[in-house]
Image (cartoon, grey):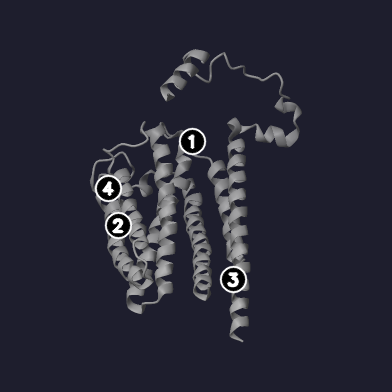
Amino acid sequence: MIQLLILLQQHASGADSLSSSSFAHKWHGAQSVQNGGPFISMMASHNLIFIVLGASLIIWFVLLFFVIRTDRKITKLEERVNQNSKDSNS
Amino acid sequence: MKAWKYIVAFWLTGVIIASFLIPVPNIAILKQSSRNLLLHVPMWFTMAVCFFTGFIYSIKYLSDGKIDTDRKAAMITQVGLVFGVCGLLTGSLWARFTWGTWWTFSEPKMNLAALGMTIYVAYFVLRMAFDNPEKRAKISAVFNVFAATTVPFLFYIIPRQLPSLHPGANGNPAFSQMTAPQLRYVFYPAVIGFIALAFWLNDIGLRYKRIKHKIERSA
C-alpha cells in the first residue's frame, strides 16, 4: 500500500518527488509574502522553520491548557471531598 | 494550582522555542535532526529519574508499609513509562531518517530499551492481578526493586559494550565528545524541564488516585 503511494507520487511528479516541475514554485492564488507585512515575511523566512515551531507551540499550549484544567478540576474535587468528610465527622 | 507548575509551563515553552531556533552545525546525515538531541534524550533522562524515584518509594514501602507510599511508587513509575514510550517512538522516527530503518534487531540500545520497558509493563500487569491492596503493594514493591536493578544494565551498561550505531556504543563517550557546545545551553534546561513536567503529571495522577480512594472508602 505504502509502496503504491510512493509509486504514485513518483509517477505524478516525475521521479524526483517534491522538487520537480509539476509543483509550481508559487501558488498563484496566494498573496506573495512580500505584501504580507513584517510578521508574515518573518514567518516565511529561514525555510519556513517558524511554521513548524508555530505548529509545535500550538500543540504544546493546547496540551498545557488541558493539563492545567485537569489540575484545577482535581483541586476543586479535593476541596469538595474534604468538605464532605469534615461535615460528616462533625 | 501551585506556582512551580506555571514556572514549568513557562520554562518548557522556552525550551521548545530554543530547540527550534538555536543554530546547529550542519553535520552530514544528521542535518537539522541534530535538534532531536534536545527532545529525544531528555525523555530517557526523565524516564530514568522516574524509575529511580519509584524504586526509592518501593523500598520505602517495604519498610513503612503505608499504602500511600505504594501509590506514589506506582504513579511515578507510570509517568516514567510514558516518557520511555516517547523516547522509543522519537528514537524510532529519528532512526528511520538517519540509519534508514524504523527498527532493527541488530541495534542493542533500541532492543534492550524496549525489553526494559516491557519489564515495567509487567509491573502494571502484576498490579492488576491482585484485589487485595496490601498484597498488591507488597508483591509489586518487591518486583519493582528487581525491575529497577535491570535499568542501568539494559539502558546503559550493556548497550555501551556492544557494536552499535547509537552514540555511546563500543565504549565511546556519547554526549561529551560529539555534541556541539551550543546545544548544551538548551539540552540541560530541557532535561530539567521535562523532569519537572514528569513530577507535575505525577502530582496530578497521585491526587486523582488519593481522591478516588477516599470516595471509594466513604461510599
Q: Of the residues shown, which amino acid type is indicated by label 4?
A: Pro
Q: Are marks 1 and 3 on the same chain?
A: no
- Under mark 2, the amino acid is Pro
Q: Secondary structure at mark 3?
A: helix
Q: Residues within 10 Å of mark 1 (few under 14, many from 20)?
A: some
* Label located before the other in sequence (1 or 2): 1
Horizontal arrangement in the rendering, residue B215 relative to residue B110 (left or right): right
Q: Position of residue B70 (x, y in %)?
A: 39, 70
Residue placed under numbered mark 4 in the picture: B159
Amino acid type, callout 1: Gln
Subunit that carries the residue with mark 2: B
Counting residues from the start of the chain, the first of labels 1 and 4 encountered is 1
Q: Secondary structure at mark 2?
A: helix
In the picture shown, does residue B33 fall above or below B119? above
Count of residue discs: 4
Labels 1, 4: one chain: yes
**Among the 4 quarters of the image, the one containing residue A66:** bottom right
Q: Residue under label 2, please give it.
A: B152
Q: Is residue A36 above or below residue B160?
A: above
Numbered disc 1: secondary structure: helix
Q: Are marks 3 and 2 on the same chain?
A: no
Callout 3: chain? A
Q: How busy is the neighbourhood of tag 2: few (under 14 within 10 Å), some, or many (20 plus)? A: few
Q: CA distance from mark 1 to mark 3?
A: 46 Å
Q: Position of residue B131 (x, y in %)?
A: 37, 67
At x 59%, y 17%, the residue is A23
In depth, the one of B79 and B156 nearer the eye is: B79
Q: Which residue lies under the disc numbered 1?
A: B32
Q: Establish whether labels 3 and 4 are both on one chain.
A: no
